[in-house]
C-alpha cells in the first residue's frame, strides 16, 4: 500500500503556481520523497526527490516540512502541458527496487 | 544522455497467443531494469526487476516472464496471453550503484489489449 495521501484533484490557472500537497505521516528517517507525473497514455516522468532539505530543479521545487510528515510540490509557472496526474511516493530507501504508486492528484491547468 | 525505448507501442493480441515486449537502454552500463504494469484505472505494479544479465526477480506470480539477454536489453514474454494480461506495460531503468537502486526512469509504455 502507498504510504502517502494526496487530494484526488486540483486545478490552477495557467501562469500561476501550482502547489500540490502530500501527507506522509509514517515516513521513516531513511525514506525519500519522490514525485512523478503521468500525462495520459505516457510513462511516468520523474520530477524531483528529497530526503530532508528543500530541493529545486528546472521543473519544480520540493518543500519538505521539518518533521518530514508532509511535503509540497511547487510548479512555479504552470502551463497547459503540466496537466497530468502527479504522484507523491515514499521510497523505502534509495536501494529499493520498488516504487509504490498511489492514486495521485489529477492537476488540471486552466487557460 | 541516457535514453530508454520499448516496443511495440501498441499491441492487440488474441487470448492464448504469445507475447514479446522489448526494451533497450542507451547511454549507461549495467543498469537496473524493471517491468511495471498499469491496469486500467489502477496504479503501477512492479512485475520484474533485474540487476544484471540473466538475473531476474519476480514480484508477483503471473502468466508472464522476463529475460535479460544483454546488459541493456530487457524482454517481457508470455507463452499464452490471458484477458487479464491487458494493460499498459512500462519498462524502466535506474543506475546500478553497487547493487543499490537510484532514481527510476520510465519508458514510453506499451499498450497491450488481449481480445
Image: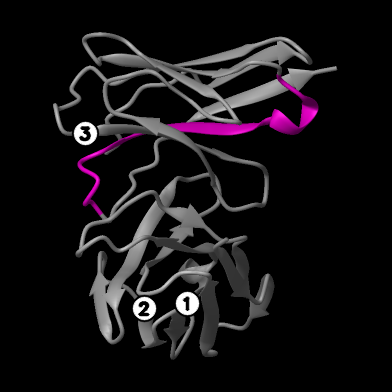
Query: What residue is rendered at 35% in x and 65% in y?
Result: B47
Residue A109 visible, this orientation:
yes
**Numbered range of the magenta stretch:** A78-96
- Give the residue at mark 1: B82
- Give the residue at mark 3: A31
Badges 3 and 2: C-beta atoms under 8 Å apart?
Answer: no
Query: What residue is rendered at 37% in x and 84% in y?
Result: B68
Badges 2 and 1: C-beta atoms under 8 Å apart?
Answer: yes
Q: Is residue A26 above or below residue B43?
A: above
Q: Residues within 10 Å of mark 3 (few under 14, many from 20)?
A: some
Q: Which mark is on residue A93?
A: none
Dot 2: element: loop
Taking the magenta stretch, the answer to whether it contains residue B52 is no
Q: Nearer the viewer, mark 3 or mark 2?
A: 3
Q: Is residue A58 above or below residue A71?
A: below
Taking the magenta stretch, the answer to whether it contains residue A90 is yes
**C-alpha separation, residue under disc 2 versus residue under disc 1:** 8 Å
Amino acid at each position: 500500500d502507498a504510504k502517502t495521501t494526496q487530494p484526488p484533484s486540483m486545478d490552477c490557472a495557467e501562469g500561476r503556481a501550482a502547489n500540490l500537497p502530500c501527507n506522509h505521516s509514517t515516513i521513516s528517517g531513511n525514506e525519500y520523497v519522490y514525485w512523478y507525473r503521468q500525462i495520459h497514455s505516457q510513462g511516468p516522468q520523474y520530477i524531483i526527490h528529497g530526503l530532508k532539505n528543500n530541493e529545486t530543479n528546472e521543473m519544480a521545487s520540493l518543500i519538505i516540512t521539518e518533521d518530514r510528515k508532509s511535503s509540497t510540490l511547487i510548479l512555479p509557472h504552470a502551463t497547459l502541458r503540466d496537466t497530468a496526474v502527479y504522484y507523491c511516493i515514499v521510497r523505502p530507501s534509495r536501494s529499493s527496487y520498488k516504487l509504490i504508486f498511489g492514486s495521485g492528484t489529477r492537476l488540471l491547468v486552466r487557460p | 544522455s541516457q535514453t530508454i525505448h520499448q516496443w511495440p507501442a501498441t499491441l492487440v493480441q488474441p487470448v492464448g497467443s504469445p507475447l514479446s515486449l522489448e526494451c533497450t537502454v542507451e547511454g549507461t552500463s549495467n543498469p537496473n531494469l524493471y517491468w511495471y504494469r498499469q491496469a486500467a484505472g489502477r496504479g503501477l505494479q512492479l512485475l520484474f526487476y533485474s540487476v544484471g544479465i540473466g538475473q531476474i526477480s519476480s514480484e508477483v506470480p503471473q502468466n508472464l516472464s522476463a529475460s535479460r539477454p544483454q546488459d541493456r536489453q530487457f524482454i517481457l514474454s508470455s507463452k499464452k496471453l490471458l484477458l487479464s494480461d491487458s494493460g499498459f506495460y512500462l519498462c524502466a531503468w535506474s543506475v546500478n550503484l553497487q547493487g543499490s537502486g537510484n532514481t527510476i526512469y520510465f519508458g514510453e509504455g506499451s499498450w497491450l489489449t488481449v481480445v
